[in-house]
Image (spheres, rainbow, N blue to C red):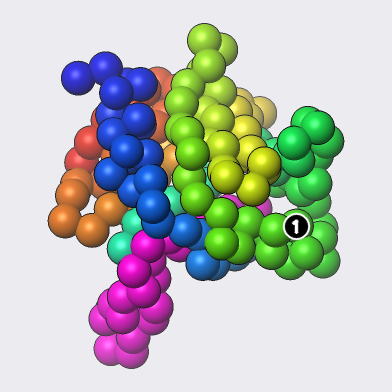
Amino acid sequence: MSEERLLNDVVVRNQRTRIWRAKKGLGSFLVLDLGERRQVLRRAGDTMERGSLQIWVQYCHWALRDERGSVLLDSGAPDSAYADALERLDGARLESLGLSPSGEVLLCCSCGLSLAMAADLAEYEREDDFLTIYEEGREPLSYSPARGVYSGE
């Protein structure tokens, strides 16, 4: 199956789900929770809430842009800039997810915002996954410049 098809299938299966949490992870990582809220048991024995679809953005340069293409937030922004920009994703649906010929991953939302992800080879390796999608009942789907889109851990 083609890379585009693997990514598009995620969108098709989840076209009615909405983002209910977009948060800053470690460093410049982003986590988007969509779909049904689930309680997941953590290794420490406590529970955490996550979406039935969870998207991790890590090990790359990323930029959140508005409908005019203006950057609202990027991976180099200070911690204080995250909350207001990420709040704009609340309630949005995932409209498309694809690859550009240059290897950039573009995630577009119903609210007019888009999240562009590109390799940052000055900081990370070509093998580093900069997008990982955890979808309930399926193997994780990841993307790295070296491996492209692939399924499994």
Front residue of 111 and 145: 111
Q: Is residue 29 magenta?
A: yes
Helix, strand or loop at mark 1: helix
The answer to whether residue 25 is seen in the rendering is no
Coordinates of residue 14 in the picture (x, y in percent): 34, 48
Coordinates of residue 12 in the picture (x, y in percent): 32, 38
The part of the chain drawn in magenta is 27-51
Write the residue at 75% across / 57% down: 85
Write the residue at 38% across / 46% down: 15
**Residue tagged 1:** 85
Q: Quadrant of the C terminus?
A: top left
Coordinates of residue 20 in the picture (x, y in percent): 51, 67
Q: Quadrant of the N terminus?
A: top left
Coordinates of residue 16 in the picture (x, y in percent): 39, 52
Vertical side of 141 occupied by 14: above or below: below
Helix, strand or loop: magenta stretch: strand
The answer to whether residue 72 is seen in the rendering is yes
Write the residue at 28% across / 88% down: 45
